[in-house]
Image: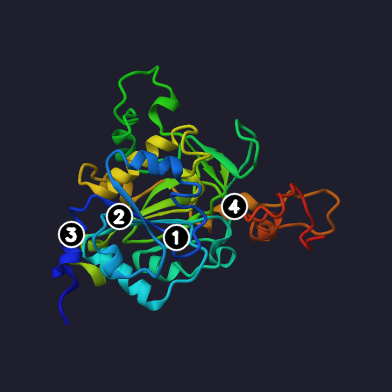
């Protein structure tokens, strides 16, 4: 069997000027619906096409990047194999998802993502205080950039080397609105790029992750790149021009299609995110004088039922341990 990396389609991906958007998996957004503004931006430098049928290596092999705008249908084994070969051959894949996880979306894309250390969680990011946007799931994140090189590529000040005491937080950080999205579980070899920030719930959880195929043990000779975003709305027509979402899109596309951005190794190794175990501390119950029992340990104060990150119910400040 010939080596996929030596095939003409595999080597063409690294130099192609084509970007393909998938419509094969009932995507929520596409260039004809929801991504018109994004398509217009990309057409200034790229040739934009669409995949409407089954994803095969023959169809994607000649493209520089393939974009999935929130797939809502299951991939076949053959399609996963084609995408894996495409990544190994030097192609770039962007997967944008949504709140509620695979069950709500009706897809099985985590099967592919987990090989790269990434998985979509079954939750939803909500803001903890009203600011600018009306819906609670339109979360404004002002301190969610986890790798300083992204901010530097966007023209922001490096907060670790800022010489001006008057530099404001907005000048140092890349602000973006994160609408109707979920969080990600990110493990090595993948690295977290963006988080939900300190004013959203779940607190400081990854919402964007990146992985180079050469970091994956089974694809050590690969040259492709994978970017996963927890919200497909992030670059939709409604939000692309909100805050600095447009600038963020340009930086992420630059990361995926060129070697101009080299992620900071320290930030990549130790991003400022919380694991799900640590965030349990935030879900404590308030001890009330009317309670019949005396609480002796911190463990019994933790109650995951106090609030649901899916947004179905909002957190209650105090409830009985029985849940009543």
Residue linked to disc 1:
23
Above or below, 196 relative to 247: below
Which numbered disc, 4 or 2, marks the residue closer to the eye? 2
Q: Residues within 10 Å of mark 2 (few under 14, many from 20)?
A: many
Sequence-first disc among 2 and 1:
1
Q: Secondary structure at mark 3?
A: helix
Q: Position of residue 271 (x, y in %)?
A: 38, 48
Q: Which mark is residue 65?
A: 2
Label 1 – label 4 distance at C-alpha: 42 Å
Sequence-first disc among 1 and 4:
1
- Asked which quadrant contains residue 132, the reply is top right
Q: Is residue 151 left or right of residue 119?
A: left
Q: In the picture, which quadrant includes the C terminus?
A: bottom right
Q: Is residue 257 left or right of residue 273?
A: left
Q: Residues within 10 Å of mark 4 (few under 14, many from 20)?
A: some
Q: Which mark is residue 224?
A: none
Label 3 – label 2 distance at C-alpha: 11 Å
Which numbered disc, 2 or 1, marks the residue closer to the eye? 1
Kindly give the residue lying farthest to the bottom in the view shown: 1
Label 2 – label 1 distance at C-alpha: 14 Å
Sequence-first disc among 4 and 2:
2
Label 1 – label 3 distance at C-alpha: 22 Å
Q: Position of residue 274 (x, y in %)?
A: 48, 51
Residues marked 3 and 2 touching at CB (< 8 Å): no
Q: In the picture, which quadrant includes the N terminus?
A: bottom left
Residue linked to disc 3:
12
Sequence-first disc among 3 and 4:
3
Q: Secondary structure at mark 1?
A: loop
């Amino acid at each position: 069997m010939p080596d996929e990396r030596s095939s003409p389609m595999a080597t063409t991906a690294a130099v192609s000027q084509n970007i393909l958007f998938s419509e094969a998996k009932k995507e929520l957004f596409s260039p004809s619906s929801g991504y018109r503004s994004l398509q217009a931006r990309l057409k200034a430098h790229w040739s934009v096409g669409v995949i409407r049928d089954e994803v095969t290596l023959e169809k994607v092999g000649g493209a520089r990047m393939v974009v999935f705008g929130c797939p809502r249908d299951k991939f076949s084994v053959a399609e996963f194999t084609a995408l894996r070969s495409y990544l190994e051959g030097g192609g770039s894949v962007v997967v944008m998802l949504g709140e509620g996880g695979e069950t709500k979306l009706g897809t099985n894309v985590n099967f592919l993502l987990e090989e790269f250390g990434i998985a979509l969680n079954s939750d939803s990011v909500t803001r903890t205080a009203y600011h600018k946007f009306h819906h609670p799931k339109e979360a404004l994140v002002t301190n969610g950039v986890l790798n300083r090189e992204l901010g530097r590529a966007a023209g922001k000040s490096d907060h670790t080397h800022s010489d001006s005491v008057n530099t404001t937080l907005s000048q140092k950080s890349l602000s973006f609105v994160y609408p109707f999205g979920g969080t990600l579980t990110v493990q090595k070899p993948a690295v977290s790029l963006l988080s939900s920030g300190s004013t959203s719930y779940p607190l400081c959880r990854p919402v964007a992750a990146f992985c180079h195929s050469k970091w994956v043990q089974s694809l050590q000779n690969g040259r492709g790149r994978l970017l996963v975003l927890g919200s497909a709305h992030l670059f939709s027509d409604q939000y692309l021009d909100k805050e600095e979402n447009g600038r963020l899109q340009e930086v992420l596309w630059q990361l995926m299609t060129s070697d101009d951005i080299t992620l900071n190794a320290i930030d990549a190794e130790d991003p400022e995110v919380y694991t799900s175990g640590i965030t349990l501390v935030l879900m404590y119950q308030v001890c009330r004088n009317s309670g019949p029992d005396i609480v002796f340990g911190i463990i019994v104060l933790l109650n995951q039922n106090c609030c649901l990150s899916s947004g179905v119910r909002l957190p209650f400040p105090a409830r009985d341990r029985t849940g009543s």
